[in-house]
Amino acid sequence: MNKFVLFFTFLALIVISGLNVLPDNNDDIGQNADPNLDFPNESEYLIGEEFNIKYIELGMMKASWYGPRFHGRLTANGEIYDQMGFTAAHKSLPFGTLLRLTNPKNKKSVIVRINDRGPYIPGRQIDLSKKVAVELDILKEGTAKLIVEKIEINGLDSPAVF
């Protein structure tokens, strides 16, 4: 019985001493902060560093689209192909390269990311996902000549990878 009393007394002392080291609800957690620290206001934090965006003309390219047969399969960069994504295939542009594609017939534009290789049909330079073909209004025709511009973002050293 004495061992029980000693054990619970010891346990009570530990609990009580532990409670004394917890901060009071009235304590100002930031009272010991360095007043010379300069924290950005919310708008500066959200805006961040300014980036310079350049569009480098790559000329006109004959585009086609691919979709249902490849949907869910692996692309050349190892990700799963999503026919409803804003992606494209090119034979040599680095994976992650961002391009602005414009249909000169209707002035519609989209931004795509290179994530696959192709096309492998002679005379075609770029293969688009089905979603891109829909947005540029070339789904029905199947192919179109598009204005292609490479997007460079000053401050990013490598292509975008998502």
Image (cartoon, rainbow, N blue to C red):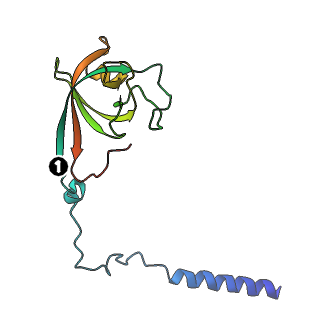
Is 124 left or right of 11, judged from the image as shown? left
Tag 1 secondary structure: loop
Q: Residue at x 22, y 56 (%)?
A: 48
Say which residue label 1 marks.
52
Q: Position of residue 56 (x, y in %)?
A: 18, 38
Quarter of the image containing the C terminus? top left
Residue situated in front as seen by the camera: 45 or 65? 65
In the image, farthest residue toward the right: 1
| Total numbered badges shown on the rendered structure | 1
Q: Is residue 97 visible?
A: yes
Q: Is residue 145 left or right of residue 74?
A: left
Mark 1: few/some/many CA within 10 Å (<14, 14-19, 20+): few
Residue 107: percent from the left, percent from the top?
16, 23
Q: Quadrant of the N terminus?
A: bottom right
Q: In the displayed image of the protein, which residue is found farthest to the top?
A: 140
Q: Could you say which is closer to the camera, residue 56 or residue 44? A: 56
Q: Amino acid at mark 1?
A: Asn
Residue drawn at 28 percent across, 23 percent down: 135
Q: With respect to residue 128, does 158 lie above or below? A: below
Q: Position of residue 58 (x, y in %)?
A: 20, 32
The image shows residue 19 at horizontal and vertical percentages of 54, 80
Which quadrant of the view contains residue 29? bottom left
Toward the viewer: 128 or 41? Answer: 128
Q: Is residue 138 visible?
A: no
Find residue 59 and report its image quarter.
top left
Residue 7 versus residue 90 in the image, above or below: below
The structure residue drawn at horizontal position 32% and vertical position 36%, both measured from the top left corner, is: 93
